[in-house]
């Protein structure tokens, strides 16, 4: 896809979705306490959690603008892990299907994430029902907003530990919870351009490998937004984040995600996560 096509795709995404889907927005977290370790190992522990083979949920998104006005989105979320042994096979696959409001209903996103050692970017596709077309989202479009929210397309990707270098900062509390604090700096300008972030500061709960707070900094080193895990609870005997918030640093604008009907190990099939299923899921 050439640069002109990339710009047209991004414009269509903004027209169709704005005003009308690492932090990785997947809900589950692991169950064991986190031991002090090298910073990169702590970040990997958050990513490499034991959250079953697959999982699904209904998600409500509430976008609050600067004036306090609220807009609500609803979508179905599903993901599954794959026993990947080669660079062509994704290690994790995720599907997001927008259900409301009417002007975004039917829009679907598919994400294929690959093994860390393959050094390969995630593949992302979007199905636009108004055009009846499926388009692949280029790397240069991943810093754009997800359906007009404060989450970026890059935030939907699986965390790639290799993309940032890490160092430990002094421990801190988030509320009454003790946390390790890890600073991650983008390894090069390419990663900055792809993610939109030069740096992230992660507050990892010492009791469980979950990020309770994540501060994001832009290419000029300014904090642009903050992620907060608002509710952490057990679902199917697995600790899970079921409510989260992304707040802009320069305004009162914020986006909430509320996870409901969360289920693990439901028997999803890999055929439900191929590119052809994007249009099928929207029928």
Image (spheres, rainbow, N blue to C red):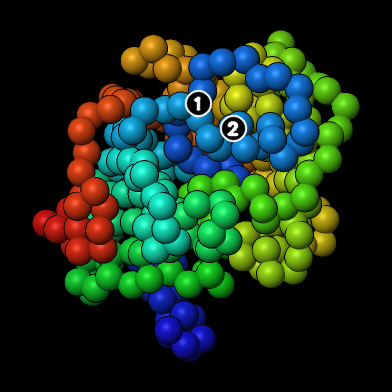
Q: Name the disc covering residue 281, or none.
A: none
Numbered circles on residues, count: 2
Which of 84 and 280 lies nearest the eye of the viewer? 84
- The residue depicted at 56 percent of the width and 23 percent of the height is 230
Q: Quadrant of the C terminus?
A: bottom left
Using the numbered discs, state the Cα–Cα distance from disc 2 to disc 1 in whole angstroms: 7 Å
- The residue depicted at 34 percent of the width and 64 percent of the height is 126
Answer few, some or many: residues within 10 Å of disc 2's Cα (few below 14, many 20 plus, some between 14 and 19): many
Secondary structure found at label 1:
loop
Residue 42, quarter of picture: top right
Residue 237, quarter of picture: top left
Instruction: Give the percent coordinates (x, y) of residue 244.
Output: 52, 31
User: Looking at the picture, does residue 184 appear above or below residue 219?
Assistant: above
Residue, disc 1: 29
Instruction: Give the percent coordinates (x, y) of residue 280.
Output: 14, 58
The residue positioned farthest toward the right in the image shown: 170
- The residue depicted at 49 percent of the width and 35 percent of the height is 256
């Amino acid at each position: 896809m050439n640069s002109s096509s990339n710009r047209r795709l991004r414009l269509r995404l903004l027209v169709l979705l704005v005003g009308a889907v690492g932090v990785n927005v997947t809900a589950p977290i692991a169950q064991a306490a986190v031991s002090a370790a090298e910073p990169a190992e702590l970040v990997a522990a958050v990513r490499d959690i034991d959250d079953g083979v697959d999982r699904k949920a209904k998600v409500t998104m509430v976008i609050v603008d600067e004036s306090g006005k609220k807009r609500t989105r609803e979508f179905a979320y599903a993901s599954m892990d794959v026993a990947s042994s080669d660079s062509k096979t994704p290690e994790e696959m995720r599907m997001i299907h927008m259900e409301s409001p009417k002007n975004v209903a039917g829009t679907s996103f598919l994400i294929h994430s690959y093994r860390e050692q393959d050094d390969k970017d995630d593949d992302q596709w979007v199905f636009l029902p108004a055009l009846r077309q499926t388009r692949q989202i280029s790397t240069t479009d991943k810093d754009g907003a997800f359906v007009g929210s404060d989450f970026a397309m890059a935030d939907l990707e699986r965390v790639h530990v290799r993309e940032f270098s890490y160092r430990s900062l002094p421990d801190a509390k988030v509320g009454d919870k003790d946390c390790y604090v890890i600073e991650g700096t983008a390894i090069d300008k390419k990663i900055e351009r792809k993610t939109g972030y030069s740096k992230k500061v992660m507050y990892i709960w010492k009791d469980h490998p979950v990020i309770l707070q994540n501060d994001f900094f832009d290419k000029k080193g300014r904090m642009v937004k903050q992620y907060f895990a608002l509710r952490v609870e057990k679902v199917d005997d697995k600790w899970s984040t079921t409510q989260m918030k992304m707040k802009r640093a320069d305004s009162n604008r914020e986006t909430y995600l509320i996870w409901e009907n969360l289920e693990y190990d439901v028997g999803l099939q890999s055929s439900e996560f191929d590119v052809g299923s994007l249009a099928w899921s929207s029928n």
